[in-house]
Image (cartoon, rainbow, N blue to C red):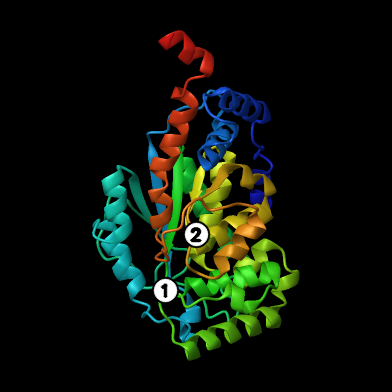
């Protein structure tokens, strides 16, 4: 824990002077103030992260954390456990959705095996084998992992960002059967909100299985009293290795002053956990799309962020986040290339 505390002490907030300059520049452009909405918000946020003038960000990196979750033993997932490995390998071969999208958009793709029970059998240049354990334990029966194991997973995410800090901008995603249960349990622990507003069907549960999923999450959180735990202990008791690893990615992005695009529900819960560990992380994260999982609305409320598009997606993998890169590019072009009224007068009169 001391190692984490030292790392957190090195995180600083956004550059407020750069934010001020970026906003003033946008307000001078040939348009009504604020009329480009989210594009302006993104440009200002990027200025706070990497300075003003806002630089282009052509070097983009997407990282998926993959792990299995012991909670599937309770019948809370509609897919079998081996799907974690199968889909992970499909991603690495660029035939799963995230592999296809990152290839099409020219985004560097990487997958971390942070705890797949049956590991990917073949080696790939963009596969990082960093298993903390071969899947978590069934948190309905016992804590998912120890605090030490949780911290190890967090530092895998931190070190991944550190190793790739030459990239301009990052996004993340996850793969792990059962991880809508772990993320819902974390969100329920942080908020003690309406369970019907938090827990969804994941990849397609029946009504009976959905009700069981809600009961399992409520009873486990009440058993451990996760409502009164610090964020690390919440992650260790009812979380997942993939989520802990993504928490580390958010912390790493903040430490190295890199923007991180949030994906959907699970990625957003990891972002919320990272912000609870170190609130300055919020200065470095950008919400992208509105997942169909019911808890998405609540987690964004907790983060104080808005997702800027909604395509009815709930796949995970970071598929929503990578689709936001062209929007980020456009935001940068607006602040850098759009002219002021005075400049236009000089050009055309």
Q: Mark 1 points at which residue?
A: 177
Image position of 10 with respect to 240: above or below: above
- In-image side of 22 versus 203 (left or right): right
Quadrant of the drawing holding the N terminus: bottom right
Looking at the rendered image, the quarter that the C terminus falls into is: top left
Q: Earlier in the sequence, mark 2 or mark 1?
A: 1
Instruction: Note whether residue 130 is visible.
Output: no
User: In the image, 319: left or right of 190?
Assistant: left
SS at badge 2: loop
Q: Percent from the top left, x then y, of residue 93?
A: 23, 57
The picture places residue 37, in percent across and down from the top left corner, at 55, 40
Furthest-front residue in view?
349
Structural crowding at the residue carrying mark 2, measured as other residues with C-alpha within 10 Å and reported as few (<14), some (14–19) or many (≥20): many
SS at circle 1:
loop
Q: Up-down: is 33 above or below 252?
A: above
Left or right, 3 with respect to 335, comes to right
Q: Residue 334 carries which label?
A: none
Q: Residue at x 54, y 61 (%)?
A: 244
**Residue farthest toward the right in the current orientation of the protein:** 228
- Viewer-nearest residue: 159 or 238: 238
Q: Residue at x 30, y 65 (%)?
A: 120
Q: Quadrant of residue 317?
A: bottom left
- Mark 2 or 1: in front is 2
- Camera-side residue of 204 and 77: 204
* Residue 158 % position (x, y): 53, 48
* Label 2 to label 1: alpha-carbon separation: 21 Å
Relative to 145, 330 lies left or right:
left
- Residue 44 placement: quadrant: top right
* Residue highlighted by disc 2: 290
Residue 92 visible from this viewpoint: yes
């Amino acid at each position: 824990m001391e190692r984490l505390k030292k790392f957190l002490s090195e995180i600083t907030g956004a550059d407020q002077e750069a934010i001020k300059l970026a906003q003033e520049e946008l307000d001078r452009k040939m348009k009504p103030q604020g009329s480009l909405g989210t594009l302006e918000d993104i440009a200002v946020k990027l200025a706070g992260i990497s300075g003003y003038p806002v630089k282009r960000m052509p070097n983009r990196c997407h990282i998926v954390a993959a792990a299995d979750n012991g909670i599937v033993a309770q019948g809370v997932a509609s897919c079998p456990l081996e799907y974690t490995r199968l889909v992970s390998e499909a991603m690495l071969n660029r035939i799963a959705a995230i592999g296809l999208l990152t290839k099409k958009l020219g985004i560097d793709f990487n997958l971390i095996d942070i705890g797949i029970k049956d590991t990917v059998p073949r080696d790939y240049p963009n596969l990082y084998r960093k298993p903390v354990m071969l899947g978590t334990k069934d948190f309905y029966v016992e804590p998912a992992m120890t605090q030490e194991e949780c911290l190890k997973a967090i530092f895998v995410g931190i070190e991944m960002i550190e190793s790739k800090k030459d990239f301009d901008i990052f996004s993340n995603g996850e793969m792990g059967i059962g991880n809508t249960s772990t993320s819902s349990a974390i969100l329920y622990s942080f908020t003690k909100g309406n369970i019907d507003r938090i827990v969804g069907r994941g990849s397609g549960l029946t009504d009976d299985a959905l009700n069981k999923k809600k009961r399992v999450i409520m009873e486990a959180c009440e058993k451990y009293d996760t409502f009164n735990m610090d964020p690390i202990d919440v992650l260790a008791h009812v979380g997942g290795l993939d989520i802990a690893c993504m928490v580390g990615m958010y912390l790493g992005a903040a430490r190295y002053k890199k923007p991180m695009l949030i994906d959907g529900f699970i990625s957003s819960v990891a972002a919320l956990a990272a912000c609870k560990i170190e609130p300055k992380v919020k200065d470095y994260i950008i919400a992208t799309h509105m997942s169909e999982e019911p808890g998405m609305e609540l987690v964004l409320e907790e983060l104080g962020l808005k997702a800027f598009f909604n395509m009815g997606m709930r796949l995970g993998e970071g598929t929503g986040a990578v689709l936001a890169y062209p929007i980020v590019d456009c935001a940068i072009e607006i602040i850098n290339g759009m002219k002021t009224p005075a400049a236009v007068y000089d050009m055309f009169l």
